[in-house]
Image (cartoon, rainbow, N blue to C red):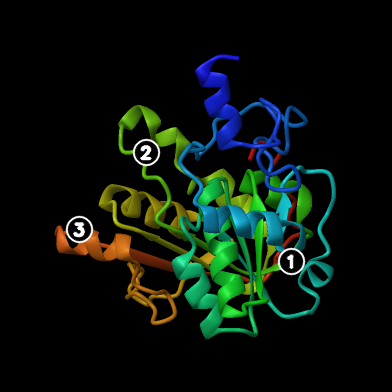
């Protein structure tokens, strides 16, 4: 046996080459080829999973995690074990802000979605250490979750904090906050629910404001029609603090879902 094979075996004792590290944990592409190919707003990143994150994934994924495979409509009351309001958070990074918000508001359930395995493990670890039972972690494409796995009016809020700004003009089509996404989100948000976005990329903030202002299913909570001050419930993250130190401007947008006027259906091309 070569030295490289010996080294591989010592790093992963008892696991055959090519076998998943977390067989009962988050899968690499849970929806597979069951749905149409389209431009995605996210790009999975490969990075090291720490021992603590790995332990959390092994222990807690079967209890608090699920793959977004598009194969069923989720009963949120069953998922969380209660009928408390549910807020969807798309893209939570390493989960520090999510855990802080969950701790500050235990009466609200947070359905946190991301594709970054270290972040998933870190959030599970934070939830476990903090005794936070109001967090569930979804792995995969939030579009499939919204369109295939959530019932109409299932959500009491939607948070999109610091999504990838895709700054190059040719990549703008990859940005998440587009009219088609907002229309889809509207079908899953109850009247009165808040769609809350935040970004430190000013051109993207302007696009968000334009898209949301033009959408008939939402109204700006700000009387002047502009950006909102950072709400106290949204923690100032380390990433955001570093940006502010560099002179970045962070903009929050809070738009309220208006009462239904017609029977909304999710757009077919979202």
Q: Name the residue under label 3.
A: 248
Vertical order, 53 against 7 (above or below): below
Q: Which residue is drawn at 68% across and 46% down?
A: 26
Q: Distance between the residues labelled 1 and 2?
A: 29 Å
In this picture, residue 207 sits left or right of residue 80: left
Q: Badge 2 is on which residue?
A: 166
Q: Position of residue 137 (x, y in %)?
A: 64, 59
Query: Which residue matches tag 1?
Result: 154
* Label 1 crowd (10 A; few <14 / some 14-19 / many >=20): some
Above or below residue 79? Residue 34 is above
x, y percentage for residue 81? 81, 75
Secondary structure of the residue carrying numbered label 1 = loop
Label 3 Cα crowd, 10 Å radius (few <14 / some 14-19 / many 20+):
some
Position of residue 90 measured from the top left corner of the image (x, y, whole percent): 55, 56
Give residue 218's mark.
none
Q: Residue placed at 49% from the left, 51% from the top?
A: 50
């Amino acid at each position: 046996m070569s030295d490289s094979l010996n080294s591989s075996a010592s790093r992963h004792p008892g696991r055959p080459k090519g076998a998943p590290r977390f067989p009962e944990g988050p899968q690499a592409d849970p929806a597979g080829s069951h749905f149409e190919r389209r431009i995605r707003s996210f790009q999975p990143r490969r990075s090291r999973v720490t021992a603590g994150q790995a332990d959390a994934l092994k222990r807690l994924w079967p209890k608090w995690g699920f793959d977004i495979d598009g194969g069923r409509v989720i009963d949120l009351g069953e998922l969380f074990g209660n009928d408390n309001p549910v807020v969807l958070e798309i893209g939570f990074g390493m989960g520090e802000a999510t855990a802080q918000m969950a701790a500050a508001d235990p009466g609200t359930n947070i359905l946190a979605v991301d594709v970054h395995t270290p972040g998933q493990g870190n959030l599970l670890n934070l939830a476990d250490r903090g005794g936070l039972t109001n967090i569930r972690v979804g792995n995969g494409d939030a579009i499939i979750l919204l369109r295939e796995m959530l019932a109409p009016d299932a959500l009491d809020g939607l948070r999109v904090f610091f999504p990838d700004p895709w700054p190059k003009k040719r990549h703008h089509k990859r940005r998440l906050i587009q009219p088609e996404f907002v229309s889809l989100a509207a079908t899953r948000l109850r009247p009165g629910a808040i769609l809350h976005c935040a970004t430190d990329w000013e051109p993207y903030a302007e696009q968000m404001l334009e898209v949301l202002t033009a959408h008939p299913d939402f109204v700006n909570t700000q009387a002047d029609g502009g950006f909102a001050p950072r709400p106290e419930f949204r923690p100032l993250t380390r990433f955001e603090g570093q940006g502010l130190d560099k002179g970045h401007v962070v903009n929050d947008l809070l738009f309220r879902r208006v009462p239904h006027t017609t029977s909304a259906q999710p757009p077919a091309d979202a």
